[in-house]
């Protein structure tokens, strides 16, 4: 009689949980995965995927304008219908939910619907069912975190933005991270009047300073009222349903929708973890070792609930490493260095490696290569949007240690260059690479003169 019913019990069928479940099941392991909300987690349902669809939808306004201004198109009357688009988006999300369902079933992983709690180092309960597993994996993700202030209940989070009944005429967005800048571009492109408030002097803390300041300029050019050193202290609802925000300087701002994109908290509460001795950080993140093992050796955690790097591809990588560690006899620690990232702002940002400030701290001397130009497309549209590219090179080894781009297709371009950075490419190797003409990306292999050093 085996000691356990399952080799692996996964709590949470988001990006990381589904990947770990199906790969472990594919190896012939007995796997169950519990979920109580939706298959595919935040990314599929209220994150990356619907967000990117919204970005596409919102880009058309500018594309139509550019076609007319610069490329000889004559366009008839045009309008955007929020409800039609949201219905199409929902159909696609449903298709992805079904796809995840099939992925799990085809791999032979059992799905258990309901809220799971950990009842012992090897025991999970879902409703009145109990499951004994050799390994438990917590992959429960995160949840939007809204600070306390009078009128907080009138604000929405990114979760609700995907299901609004109508496009707000005036949107106020609080926050200066990924979600805030992405929604500022989306709502602005769709025709809402957008004000974005960030509490500090410059948003996107942690990104390269040139990226932050250039993006702020470009976002303002597109018509977003971007205000720094400002926050909301109170929110009131008027009898007509509109909202009135009081700001830190005492002034007031009217809005039809207020989005708080002020960060996300790991989803670790009420899972029974602390009672078992699983250590959590102050923000609820599960403390794990380099192999994603919690302080209880049979309980593991990956993805946003560990608050390492909250990105889907990182959760997938952590899942693959965990399966290798637990079931293939190859202890594999996930690598959290040189993780490329894109912010789907308008224009978008792509980054891999170190910011200039981080590089200057780590290396004795760095060379900075920077270029800012108007992309070919806009020579005809007349738009004053500019592209910014930046390389950071460690002078001693000649390795490119940071690469940053603000401009069209940033995510697509930087994904390719991330391979070069991962391989430790030097500036000389960048220089020896022939460009593709005419593209913006060729600038990364043709920048010859450093603009500054330390
Ligand atoms: P972030 O942590 O990126 O940003 C949170 C923002 O809210 C920061 O600007 C922060 O300011 C501000 N903030 C925090 N608390 C308060 C407060 N009390 N009052 C006012 N402002 C506050 O979180 P997001 O919610 O934008 O996104 C969560 C994570 O999801 C991201 O970090 C990213 O990992 C992931 N994500 C990735 C995307 C992508 O890959 N394109 C897209 C969307 C999300 P400060 O900097 O001063 O602390």
Image: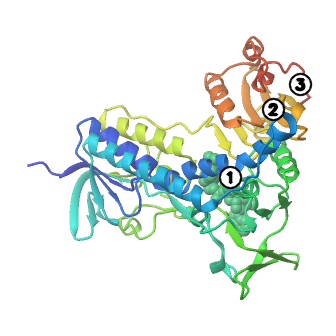
Q: How many marks?
A: 3
In the orientation shown, which residue stands out farthest toward the left? 1
Mark 2 and mark 3 lie on one chain; the one further toward the N terminus is 2
Q: Where does the image place residue 399, in percent across and percent down from the top left? A: 72, 22
Q: Where does the image place residue 297, in percent across and percent down from the top left? A: 35, 51
Residue at position x 22%, y 59% from top?
Answer: 131
Q: Is 445 situated left or right of 371 in this image?
A: left
Q: Of 375 and 425, which appears nearest the observer?
A: 375
Of circles 3 and 1, the one toward us is 1
The CA span between labels 2 and 1 is: 19 Å
Query: Is residue 353 at all visible to an observer of this figure?
Result: no
The residue that disc 3 covers is 450
Mark 2 and mark 1 lie on one chain; the one further toward the N terminus is 1
* Residue 264 image-quadrant placement: bottom right
Query: Is residue 37 at all visible to an observer of this figure?
Result: yes
Q: Is 40 situated left or right of 310 in this image?
A: left
**SS label for mark 2:** strand
The residue that disc 1 covers is 178
Of circles 2 and 3, the one toward us is 2
Q: CB at mark 2 closer than 8 A to ligand 1? A: no
* Residue 246 image-quadrant placement: bottom right
Residue at position x 59%, y 55% from top?
Answer: 85
Q: CB at mark 1 closer than 8 A to ligand 1? A: yes
Residue at position x 54%, y 53% from top?
Answer: 89
The CA span between labels 2 and 3 is: 12 Å
Q: Where does the image place residue 76, in percent across and percent down from the top left? A: 76, 48
- The circle on residue 27 is none
The residue that disc 2 covers is 389
Near mark 2 (Cα within 10 A), the count class, few <14, some 14-19 or many ≥20, is many
**SS label for mark 1:** helix
Q: Are marks 2 and 1 in contact (CB under 8 Å)?
A: no
């Amino acid at each position: 009689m085996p000691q356990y019913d399952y080799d692996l019990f996964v709590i949470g069928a988001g990006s990381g949980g589904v990947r770990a479940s199906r790969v472990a099941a594919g190896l012939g392991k007995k796997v169950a995965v519990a979920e109580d909300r939706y298959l595919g987690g935040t990314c599929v349902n209220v994150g990356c995927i619907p967000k990117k669809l919204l970005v596409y939808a919102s880009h058309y306004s500018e594309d139509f304008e550019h076609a007319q201004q610069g490329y000889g198109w004559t366009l008839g009357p045009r309008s955007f219908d929020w409800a039609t688009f949201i219905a199409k988006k929902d159909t696609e999300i449903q298709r992805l939910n079904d796809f995840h369902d099939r992925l799990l079933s085809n791999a032979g992983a059992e799905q258990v619907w309901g809220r799971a709690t950990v009842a012992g180092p090897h025991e999970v309960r879902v409703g009145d069912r109990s499951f004994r597993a050799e390994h438990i994996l917590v992959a429960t993700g995160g949840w939007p975190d809204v600070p306390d202030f009078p009128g907080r209940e009138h604000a929405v989070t990114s979760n609700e933005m995907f299901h609004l009944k109508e496009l707000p005429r005036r949107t106020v967005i609080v926050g200066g991270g990924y979600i805030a800048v992405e929604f500022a571009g989306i709502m602005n492109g769709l025709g809402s009047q957008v004000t974005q408030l960030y509490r500090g002097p410059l948003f996107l803390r942690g990104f390269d300073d040139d990226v932050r300041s250039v993006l702020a300029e470009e976002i303002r050019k597109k018509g977003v009222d971007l205000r720094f050193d400002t926050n909301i202290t109170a929110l009131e609802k008027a009898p007509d349903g509109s909202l009135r925000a009081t700001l830190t300087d005492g002034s007031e701002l009217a809005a039809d929708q207020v989005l708080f994109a002020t960060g996300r908290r790991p989803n670790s509460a009420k899972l029974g973890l602390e009672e078992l001795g699983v250590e959590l950080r102050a923000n609820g993140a599960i403390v794990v070792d380099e192999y994603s093992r919690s302080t209880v050796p049979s309980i593991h955690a990956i993805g946003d609930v560990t608050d390492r790097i909250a990105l889907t591809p990182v959760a997938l990588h952590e899942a693959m490493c965990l399966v290798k560690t637990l079931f293939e006899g190859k202890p594999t620690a996930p690598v959290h260095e040189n993780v490329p990232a894109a912010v789907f702002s308008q224009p978008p940002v792509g980054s891999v490696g170190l910011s200039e400030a981080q590089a200057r701290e780590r290396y004795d001397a760095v060379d900075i290569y920077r270029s800012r130009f108007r992309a070919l497309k806009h020579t005809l549209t007349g738009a004053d949007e500019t592209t910014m590219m930046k390389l950071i090179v460690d002078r001693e080894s000649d390795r490119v240690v940071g690469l940053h781009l603000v401009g069209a297709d940033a995510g697509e371009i930087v994904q390719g260059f991330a391979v070069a950075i991962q391989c430790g490419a030097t500036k000389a190797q960048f220089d020896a690479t022939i460009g593709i003409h005419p593209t913006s990306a060729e600038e990364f292999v043709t920048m010859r003169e450093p603009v500054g050093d330390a």
